């Protein structure tokens, strides 16, 4: 009995080792969950909260964007799209043309003329809005009597609907009965054809858009100024720094993160600022103030026959230009040490 027991122990141990090897090999054959699955398992509650918003954005923005990109590859226009006239249903007859619309747009000087003016319009509006907003924010960051009233008055243009503001400015720019020409004639100067002269029309639309954009810059930059510790200014003043030196070495670096964000947002909004151009001058006189987005609108809703495919191609090109600008802007900020 003792001999048999001593022989069975190594055999049992060998069996357990074999089972252990088999058990370990079974575990090693299982696939480890991927990064997406681990993220879903760990943050399932957050994903469930975000999912409705993602679905709504996908339906509201994603589908029209995909539809527009697909139409830009066709020759769709008012005459060959699907439509219903009375009781008659006419099916669509447009066809795929590939990148022909994009080649036609890039070969046409109209696109480059509109792009040049759009860039000038965007840079001018953003630069003037930022400069005026920063100057007003610095003044309103100080303590003085009636500061709340001034802040409310300067923010008011942002609260008024854009079309109301533009129509008001249109009355002010009226050549015969406008306030500006009344002031000029009263001072002994000639009337100015604000909206009928190409140069003055460009000046007018820039002025109106700057007036609408300054409140946003003011609010954002004022918030950034209030986040800068006051001890820095006191220490710099005790060291003998001048107001310009304090502004250059404390205020501007302290506003860098806020400035980078508001400049990017303002550039994107101004690049696509449809209401000011369309309601004030309708792209005129002629096509002097026409920007990319208003011309794309004209192709799809004004010019007959309506060219849906070319208008969609213009929209895709506008999106690509803004995406390239955002990427280049972010890289430039990262080179300067910003983490945006």
Image (spheres, helix red, strand yellow):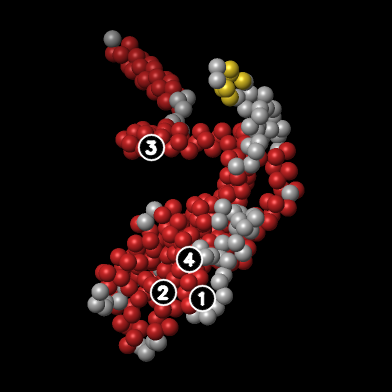
Mark pair 3, 4: CA separation: 47 Å
Q: Which of marks 3 and 2 is nearer the N terminus?
A: 3
Q: Nearer the viewer, residue 291 or 25?
A: 291
Q: Which residue is drawn at 69% across and 54% down?
A: 112
Q: Which label was assigned to residue 135?
A: 2
User: Which is nearer the N-term, disc 1 or disc 2?
Assistant: 2
Whether residue 195 is visible here, answered yes or no, is: yes
Where residue 109 sits in the image (x, y, percent)? 73, 53
Decide which of tag 3 and tag 4 comes sooner along the chain: 3
Q: Is residue 182 left or right of residue 235?
A: right
When asked about the image quadrant of residue 307, the answer is top right
The 10 Å Cα crowd at callout 4, few under 14, some 14 to 19, many 20 or more, is some
Q: Do the residues labelled 4 and 2 touch (CB within 8 Å)?
A: no
The residue under the point 52% across, 35% down is 64
Name the residue furthest left: 145
Please report contact status of discs 3 and 4: CB closer than 8 Å, yes or no.
no
Residue 325: quadrant of the picture: bottom right
Asked which secondary structure carries label 1, the reply is helix
The residue indicated by pointer 3 is 53
Q: Identify the residue at image location x=73%, y=38%.
A: 100
State the CA–CA distance, disc 4 to disc 1: 11 Å
Q: Few, some or many C-alpha atoms within 10 Å of disc 3 (few <14, some 14-19, many ≥20)?
A: few
**Which residue is rendered at x = 60% and y = 51% of the image?**
292
CA gap between label 1 and label 2 equals 32 Å
The image position of residue 275, as x and y in percent, is 49, 52
Residue 216 is situated, as x and y percent measured from the top left of the image, at 40, 61
Which residue carries the number 4 mark?
178
Determine which residue is flagged by label 1: 185
Element type at marker 3? helix
Using the image as rendered, state which of residue 64 and residue 160 is in the foreground.
160
């Amino acid at each position: 009995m003792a001999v048999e027991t001593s022989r069975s122990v190594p055999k049992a141990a060998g069996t357990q080792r074999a089972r252990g090897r088999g058990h370990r090999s079974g575990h090693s054959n299982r696939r480890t969950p991927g990064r997406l699955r681990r993220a879903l398992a760990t943050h399932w509650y957050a994903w469930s909260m975000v999912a409705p918003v993602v679905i709504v954005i996908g339906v509201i923005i994603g589908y029209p964007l995909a539809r527009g990109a697909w139409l830009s590859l066709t020759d769709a226009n008012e005459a060959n799209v699907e439509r219903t006239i009375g009781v008659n249903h006419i099916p669509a007859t447009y066809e795929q043309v590939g990148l022909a619309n994009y080649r036609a747009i890039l070969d046409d000087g109209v696109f480059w003329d509109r792009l040049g003016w759009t860039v000038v319009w965007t840079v001018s509006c953003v630069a003037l809005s930022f400069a005026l907003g920063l100057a007003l924010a610095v003044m309103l960051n100080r303590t003085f009597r009636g500061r709340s009233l001034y802040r409310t008055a300067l923010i008011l243009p942002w609260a008024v609907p854009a079309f109301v503001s533009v129509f008001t400015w249109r009355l002010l720019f009226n050549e015969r009965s406008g306030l500006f020409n009344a002031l000029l004639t009263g001072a002994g100067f000639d009337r100015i054809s604000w909206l009928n002269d190409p140069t003055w029309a460009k000046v007018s639309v820039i002025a109106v858009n700057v007036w609408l954009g300054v409140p946003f810059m003011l609010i954002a930059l004022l918030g950034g100024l209030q986040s800068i510790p006051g001890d820095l200014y006191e220490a710099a003043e005790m060291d003998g720094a001048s107001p310009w030196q304090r502004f250059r070495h404390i205020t501007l670096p302290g506003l860098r993160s806020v400035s980078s964000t508001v400049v990017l947002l303002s550039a994107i909004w101004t690049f696509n600022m449809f209401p000011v151009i369309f309601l004030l001058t309708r792209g005129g006189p002629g096509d002097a103030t026409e920007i990319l987005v208003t011309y794309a609108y004209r192709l799809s809703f004004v010019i007959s026959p309506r060219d849906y495919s070319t208008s969609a191609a213009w929209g895709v090109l506008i999106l690509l230009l803004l995406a390239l600008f955002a990427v280049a802007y972010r890289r430039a900020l990262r080179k300067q040490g910003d983490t945006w």
